[in-house]
């Protein structure tokens, strides 16, 4: 699968302090490896060898550990952000890296998403973007998607209030984007996929599809110490594929 990926790894992980006082959040260990290492291994397993990683908080903890990425079968280019640019703004900053369809992966989650299947779905549908979606019982902390019977997303709301809920299908932080998406992101200012870009694209009639993760594909959020302990217990017991 000859396409590039960008892994978003610049967040400060404030809710995981003091673990994240001296390391970037994606460097938190699960079964003895940083979360980011699990993600790079996943990308390499699906034939994705060119990876861009954005950095901000404790960037040296990532650069010193991964270097050029060759040990994991990838080649890493780093993008340091003196000021955080948001999820979409981070990708806009390195727009020149992407001249064809590419993957976005949020580097502080763990997933077993079938990236190859996701890309095949994206190419078959032919939209400007595809968002991998995960079913979540409580979607209020996520971006939720409303889909038609062809899996086209017709509405997207980031972190809805309880009275705004219309779906339990939430963004898994895994995207396939066509490069023209980046033209819709403002240059040099913070911008977020869920709050800003997706609603804007939908409002102007752009076609975005939702890939519903199915059996064998999962997602684990690690936002709080309680999340981390729960995920560690699952992975250390060998329940993950």
Image (cartoon, rainbow, N blue to C red):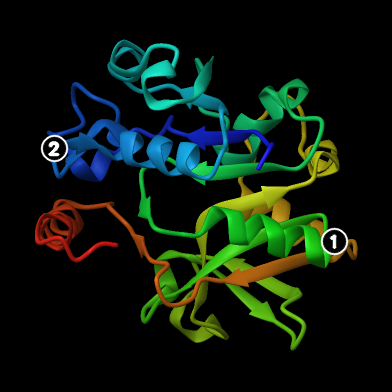
> Residue at the spot x=51%, y=44% of the render?
105
- Which residue occupies the foreground of this view, 84 or 22? 22
Residue 162 seen by the camera: yes
24 to 128, vertically: above or below: above
> Which badge, 2 or 1, is on the more N-terminal residue?
2
Under circle 2, the secondary element is loop
Q: Nearer the viewer, residue 100 or 187?
A: 100
Above or below 185: residue 193: below
Give residue 50's position: percent from left, percent from top. 59, 26
Residue at 50%, 26% in the rendered image: 53
Q: Marks 2/1: CA distance? A: 39 Å
Q: Say whether marks 2 and 1 touch (CB < 8 Å).
A: no
Residue 80 appears in view:
no
Which mark, by number, is residue 25? none
Q: Please state the horizontal and vertical placement of residue 27, each as a whole percent of the image.
A: 26, 31
Q: Position of residue 225 (x, y in %)?
A: 14, 51
Q: Could you tell whether 213 is left or right of 217 in the image?
A: right
Which quadrant is home to the C terminus?
bottom left
Q: Residues within 10 Å of mark 2 (few under 14, many from 20)?
A: few
Q: Which mark is residue 126?
A: 1
Q: Quadrant of residue 68?
A: top left
Quarter of the rendering occupied by the N terminus:
top right
| Residue at disc 1, secondary structure | loop
Residue assigned mark 2: 32
Query: Which image quarter: residue 11?
Result: top left
Q: Position of residue 189 (x, y in %)?
A: 67, 29
The residue positioned farthest toward the right in the image shown: 205
Q: For this rendering, which residue is in front, 178 or 195? A: 178
Q: Is residue 194 above or below residue 2?
A: below
**Residue ID at (55%, 54%):** 115
Q: Badge 1: few (under 14), some or many (20 or more) residues near its Cα, within 10 Å? A: few
């Amino acid at each position: 699968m000859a396409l590039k990926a960008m892994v978003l790894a610049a967040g400060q992980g404030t809710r995981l302090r003091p673990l994240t006082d001296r390391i970037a959040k994606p460097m938190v260990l699960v079964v003895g490896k940083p979360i980011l290492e699990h993600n790079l291994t996943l990308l390499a397993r699906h034939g994705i060898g060119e990876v861009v990683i954005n950095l901000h908080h404790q960037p040296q903890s990532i650069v010193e550990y991964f270097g050029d990425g060759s040990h994991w079968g990838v080649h890493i280019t780093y993008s340091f952000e003196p000021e955080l640019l948001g999820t979409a703004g981070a990708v806009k900053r390195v727009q020149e890296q992407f001249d064809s369809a590419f993957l976005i992966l949020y580097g502080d989650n763990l997933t077993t998403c079938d990236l190859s299947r996701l890309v095949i779905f994206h190419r078959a549908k032919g939209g400007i973007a595809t968002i991998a979606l995960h079913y979540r019982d409580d979607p209020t902390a996520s971006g939720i998607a409303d889909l038609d019977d062809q899996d086209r997303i017709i509405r997207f709301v980031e972190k809805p209030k309880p009275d705004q809920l219309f779906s339990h299908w939430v963004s898994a932080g895994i995207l396939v984007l066509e490069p023209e998406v980046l033209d819709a992101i403002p240059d040099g200012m913070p911008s977020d996929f869920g709050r800003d870009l997706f609603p804007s694209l939908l409002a102007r009639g752009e076609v975005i599809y939702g890939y519903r993760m199915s059996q064998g594909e999962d997602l684990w959020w690690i936002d709080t110490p309680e999340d981390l302990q729960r995920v560690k217990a699952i992975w250390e017991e060998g329940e993950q594929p």
